[in-house]
Amino acid sequence: MIVIDASALTKYILKEPEWEIIERYLVEDDVYSIDLIMKEVLNAIWKNTVIYKTIPIDISLEKYQLVKKIIDNEIIVLEYEEKYLYKAFKIAIDNNITIYDALYLAQAMDHKAGLLTSNKIQARTAKNLGIKVYLIA
C-alpha cells in the first residue's frame, strides 16, 4: 500500500517529466490518499489554466474528468482528512511543515504505508518520521 500526495498526482495529471513512473504505481499498487488531494490537484490545474495560461480551458476540463475518473474508479482510494487532523497537526508543528503536507504523512504513518511524492521537503520529513519514501522529482 502507498499513500500518494498532491504533488505526485499533479505531476501525473499534468504529464510533467517522469509522470509515467507515477502511472506504474497507480496501476500496480493499492494507492490511498486523503480527500484533500482532489482540491489540491484541481487548484494546480486551475493555476496552470487561469494564471500561467499554459493549459487551455478545454484541456483543463478534460484533466478534471481524469482526476474524477481516477477517484470514481478507486484507482486511488480516498479517506476523509478529518480522521488524521490531530496527528497531522502535531506532525506539522513538530516538523515545521504545512498541515496540508502533514495530512499525507499522518495517513501513511497510520497505515504503515510508503509515501509517493514529488515534493523533496515532504520526502525528507517523511524519511525523518520513518516512512518509506518513493520520490519522483
Image (spheres, helix red, strand yellow):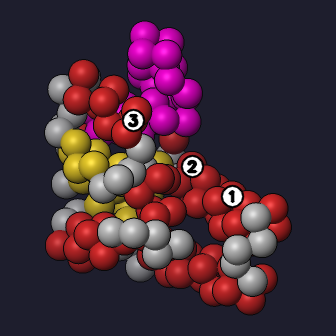
Q: Which residue is mark 3?
A: 122
Q: Is residue 63 above or below residue 123?
A: below
Q: Which residue is mark 1?
A: 43
Name the front one of labels 2 and 3.
3
Name the front one of labels 2 and 1.
1
Farthest residue in the right direction?
50
Q: Is residue 2 above or below residue 9?
A: above
Q: Amino acid at mark 3?
A: Gln
Q: Residue at x 64, y 59 (%)?
A: 44
**Label 2, label 3: how far apart the Cα atoms are:** 16 Å
Farthest residue in the top direction?
94
Q: Any magenta on residue 11?
A: no
Q: Residues within 10 Å of mark 3 (few under 14, many from 20)?
A: many
Quadrant of res 77 = bottom left
Q: Callout 2: helix, strand or loop?
A: helix
Q: Residues within 10 Å of mark 2 (few under 14, many from 20)?
A: some
Q: Which residue is mark 2?
A: 36
Q: Nearer the viewer, residue 73 or 102?
A: 102
Where residue 135 appears, as percent x and y from the top left, is 27, 49
Q: Residue at x 50, y 23 (%)?
A: 97
Which badge, 2 or 1, is on the more N-terminal residue?
2
Q: Amino acid at mark 1?
A: Asn
Would you say 65 lies left or right of 132 here? Answer: right
Where residue 118 appears, as percent x and y from the top left, is 38, 51
Q: Nearer the viewer, residue 80 or 30?
A: 30
Q: Amino acid at mark 2?
A: Leu
